Image (cartoon, rainbow, N blue to C red):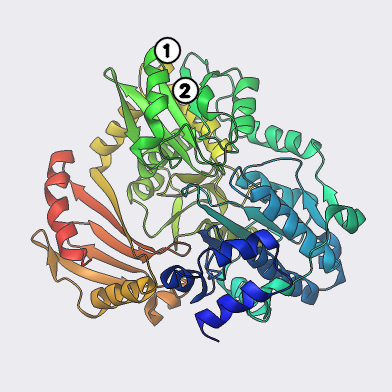
Amino acid sequence: MNYLDKYNEWCNSSNIEEKDREELIAIASDDKEIKERFLYDLEFGTGGLRGILGIGTNRINKYIIRKTTKGFAEYIKKAGEDACKRGVVIAHDNRRYSIEFCLETAGVLAANGIKAYIFDSLRPTPELSFAVRELGAFGGVMITASHNPPEYNGYKLYDERGCQLVPHVNDLVVEEIAKVSDPLAVKSLKREEAGALIETVSAELDETYYKRVMEICVTPDVKKDIKIVYSPQHGTGNVPVREVLARLGYNVIPVEEQCYPNTEFENTKNPNPETEDAYSLCYEYAEKTDADIIITTDPDCDRLGVAVKQNGKYVRMTGNQSAAVLIEYILSRKTEEGTLPKNGVMFNTVVTSDIGDKICADYGVVTEKTLTGFKFIGDKIYQHELAGDREFVFGYEESYGCLIAPFVRDKDAVQASLMLCEAAAYYHEQGKTLIDVLNSLYEKHGFYLDALDNFAFKGIDGPDRMKALLNSLRNDPPKSAAGIPVVKMEDYESDEMMALGFPSSNVLRFILEDGSWVAVRPSGTEPKCKFYFSVRGKDKAAAEAKLPDIKKAFERV
């Protein structure tokens, strides 16, 4: 069936709502738009579904949500009656149609005899992970597109450990989704039809989560003599982050214009803490109140961004930098208190700066690398729990996501917000800022310059162009960059890397003779390719001088 046949099938189906049919009829004369919507099916990738909202097989809408959930339901039913009774927890963020998609997910599960738990309003991604574990559910669903623009939404699946699906489980679910031939014919029960099969999660779970977060403190009696500006970017962090910090006595100044849920993110230039635009209003609040630090969480509250007042200006920290300071703070304080485990392990990814590894080595903590995706870190935590050989001390990705304590198995910006504020308060007592601590780490371990470039591959031929780019680098890698020899290429699709325990993944990493490296990775959820750069130098100026030539050698776009 070609894209026009699929388009006509949807237009003429008796199972499509009239308003959705009208949306399709409105594009009847636009072949390009029809092709964009129907040539492909929206792919369930390594991070679940994420796509532009709209009607069509290559858009995210309630019919595609139903199809995906039907596939997940078939996977659950094959796991047995107990799995169906334990059920699935569903949470959602503030985006367009998030509530509707949450109810559709619950309705399809209920139609298949599977218990569904829903929250009474929006909740952060880490609390969804926590709820799956706390309720003993068989799985979880998070309706979110994280920090993407308003026209996007998404759907992430979790296993019974509260961890996003690892590849071999993900593949089984994808097989079941592929068997659902007609997304328009999938049955979904309304709340009143489902009866006891759809249950609202008790507010007591929020309280349990808050208490567990507050237990992560390593210096509970630290003086809270700092001013903190906070923005949830119109998302799910507003209640949990402010609640936890308020209970512990921190002086939090909320960016009021960004504290209420809003589908259009109307008062933020960009809800992604990785971008300068996310901080515009935060800077205004910080300057007016003479704040010491700014923290901001992304809409589903699994990532934390921070800016620190340093010499009268607010300086943003990268995810690698804020994590390095947190590692130093946690490990040094636990060493002083005699609570650092002798068999400690820290997890990060192959695209994460090596400075965290260096800090851990100083404290006798082992570092283990994973592929990008916190599910791999969650899985590592579980494997070490089973073996009883290593105790988790920290986990993070360079993209502003970290985990302090593993009662959650995903990035947790509620935990990170508390620990970052505690570290800032602790060092403030010593007359230091977080930037001062970071600079001392650079003095000890050398300078690490981190950079990330994203290249979008939009349109129908986008996936093919991305594939050609990776193949070019794989088959004809640069021999040198900035005059520095490339001494090794790590191909994560190779037998060599799989023998080291890495799942096969279309990721390349190039190691330079001076310890710098470049990694190239197509996104698992969006049509873009990411270039990660970690440049070593004796100081910032030396590293910055190398970066342009290193980029030039690798960015064949």
Residue 389, can we see it?
no
Q: Secondary structure at mark 1?
A: helix
Q: Do the residues under discs 2 and 1 have CB atoms within 8 angstroms?
A: yes
Marking on residue 229: 2
Question: As shown in the figure, which amino acid type bears the numbered disc 1?
Answer: Thr
- Report the Cα–Cα distance between label 2 and label 1: 9 Å
Residue beneath label 1, please? Answer: 289
Q: Is residue 307 visible?
A: yes
Quadrant of res 292? top left
Q: Position of residue 411 (x, y in %)?
A: 54, 48
> Which mark is first along the chain, 1 or 2?
2
Q: Position of residue 41 (x, y in %)?
A: 54, 74
Residue drawn 60% across the image and 59% down it: 156
Residue 328 vertical position relative to residue 344 in the rendered view, above or below: above
Count of labels shown?
2
Q: Quadrant of residue 428?
A: top left
At 22% from the left and 56% from the top, the residue drawn is 516
